[in-house]
Amino acid sequence: MTDAAWLELSGITKRFGKAVAVDGVNLSVRRGEFLTLLGASGCGKSTTLRMIAGLEQADEGEIRLDGRAVTHVPAHRRQTAMVFQSYALFPHLTVAQNVAFGLEMQGQTPAAVRPKVAEALSLVELDDFAARYPRQLSGGQQQRVALARAVVTEPKALLLDEPLSNLDAKLRDRLRVDLRALQRKLGVTTIYVTHDQSEAMSLSDRVAFMAAGKIVEIATPTQIYQQPRNRATADFLGIANLIDGVVTSVGHETEVDTPLGKVRTQTLADPVIGQKVLACLRPEDMSLGHGAGLAGVISHAAFMGAFTDYMVAIGEGLTLRIHAPGAPRHQLGETVQVILPAMASVIAKGAA
């Protein structure tokens, strides 16, 4: 276990029959860190979380928490707490009784439980709802109860499996802010599973992108979005214009020749002249004008509120997605000049 790791997974593998759901995952999470497992459905992120919780048994590998091997420790003895997509509240118990359940299972006395329950409900702003039943609460309130029930036991790791996916968009946005504030206040190490890029980017200290049972890439939200090291990551996180290129010059800055012209980069590790690469151009990194630039024709324009999403045809068979602030300023069929960023992120073809 590394010095900085509070939770560590070493070579964790899980099979269901012949299907490999999680394939040799290695992961180190620091104490107090908020880390998100991000990926499409079926990539292995929820199975990984369930193995950390002890709800699934790993076929291979080791899980360590706070210096202790917990791979074969039963779920109720791991000192982790899980929040599920479905909330999983007991319908016959009041809010206070739901929150108290874990403490009671630990054998704590009613006198010890009461103030802890009150504090947990205060943290999630449900002080006045203690006597209600889950059926009397909104979806957002039920999710807050589930969070209170999880944190009241003071777990060493808080595990959340797509906890906001059943809520409407506006409520999800509000609860993201509240959840991150709660996590920072408590300082609890948190592993969050989602397929929602916005959740991953707005909540996390680091994002681990998963595909086909493996962690493909792990970095801060800024790094993983602006400087992806893998084509699958670039494709999944937002919109990426991926342009074939060849390295033509190396040095402090690497120069890449593409069908759009030459682009410069500092993101390519150990570049070699002649190396085949992909330039990753995000839609918001380019702009449209009528001056100097790359000539193109508007083939699509959709107003998205904060920006307009354009498709611009460049020559034969090449179309760029470009996001320009505000309402549409260009018409279908209009010839415009595409201004490329001074620097671009570049992905090695071997990592694509």
Image (cartoon, helix red, strand yellow):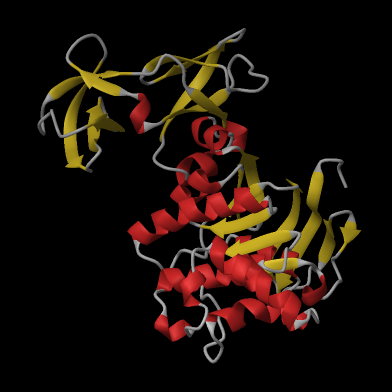
Residue 175, picture quadrant: bottom left
Q: Residue at x 65, y 62 (%)?
A: 159
Q: Residue at x 57, y 86 (%)?
A: 90
The number of numbered discs placed on residues in the rendered structure image is 0
Residue 79, picture quadrant: bottom right
Relative horizontal placement of residue 257, taking residue 48 as reference (left or right): left
In the image, residue 197 lies at what x, y percent? Answer: 46, 49
Question: Taking 38 as reference, is 153 above or below it?
Answer: below
In the image, residue 319 lies at what x, y percent? Answer: 29, 33
Is 323 or 15 nearer to us in this picture?
323
Relative horizontal placement of residue 137, taking residue 89 as reference (left or right): left
Q: Residue at x 66, y 53 (%)?
A: 186
Question: Taking 102 as reference, is 150 above or below it?
Answer: above
In the image, residue 238 lies at what x, y percent? Answer: 42, 42
Q: Residue at x 67, y 76 (%)?
A: 114
Question: Taking 240 as reference, is 46 above or below it?
Answer: below
* Viewport quadrant of the C terminus: top right
Q: Is residue 20 visible?
A: no
Is 37 or 129 nearer to us in this picture?
129
Residue 268, picture quadrant: top right
In the image, residue 258 lies at what x, y percent? Answer: 42, 20
Question: Taking 263 as reference, is 200 above or below it?
Answer: below
Q: Is residue 79 visible?
A: yes
